Image (cartoon, grey):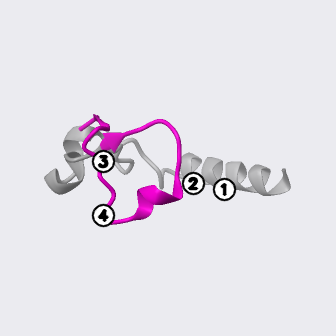
Amino acid sequence: MKRLHAIVLILFCFSASGKITEHSVKLLTKDSLPKELNEGWFFHQGDSMDFRSQDFNDSGWQVVA
């Protein structure tokens, strides 16, 4: 908890001194990602050690991007 308080205090000090502005913070959005990171994502609820295999067939998974 002390670590969290220290981080909040540091962030407050930077924002109060003008070091962090709305122009220096860039939010990542789907459209701001490079195309190769923006496509080809699949979703399947659950987990299995088999999923890590390069030969795993994920063709039945839901396409999300």
Check if mark 4's residue and mark 2's residue have beta carbons within 8 Å: no
Q: Which residue position holds label 1? A: 10
Q: Quadrant of residue 10?
A: bottom right
From the viewer's side, name the closer residue of 56 and 45.
Answer: 56
Label 2: which secondary element:
helix
- Which residue is situated farthest in the left direction here? 35
Residue 14 numbered mark, or none: 2
Badge 4 density bin: few <14, some 14–19, many ≥20, Cα 10 Å: few
Q: In this view, does 65 lie above or below 48?
A: above
Spatial CA span between label 1 and label 2: 6 Å
For the C terminus, the image quarter is top left
Q: Is residue 40 above or below residue 3?
A: above
- Which residue is situated farthest in the right direction here? 2
Magenta stretch: helix, strand or loop mostly:
loop
At label 1, the amino acid type is Ile
Q: Which of marks 3 and 1 is in front?
A: 3
Q: Which tag, 4 or 2, sits closer to the chain's start?
A: 2
Residue 48 at what x, y percent from top left?
A: 52, 52
Q: What stretch is highlighted in magenta?
A: 42-65
Q: Which residue is drawn at 28% across and 45% down?
A: 41
Residue 27 inside the magenta-drawn segment: no
Q: Quadrant of residue 23?
A: top left
Label 4: which secondary element:
loop
Q: Which of marks 4 and 1 is in front?
A: 4
Check if mark 1's residue and mark 2's residue have beta carbons within 8 Å: yes
Q: Which tag, 3 or 1, sits closer to the chain's start?
A: 1
Badge 1 density bin: few <14, some 14–19, many ≥20, Cα 10 Å: few
Check if mark 2's residue and mark 3's residue have beta carbons within 8 Å: no
Spatial CA span between label 2 and label 3: 45 Å
Q: Which residue position holds label 4? A: 55
Residue 58 numbered mark, or none: 3
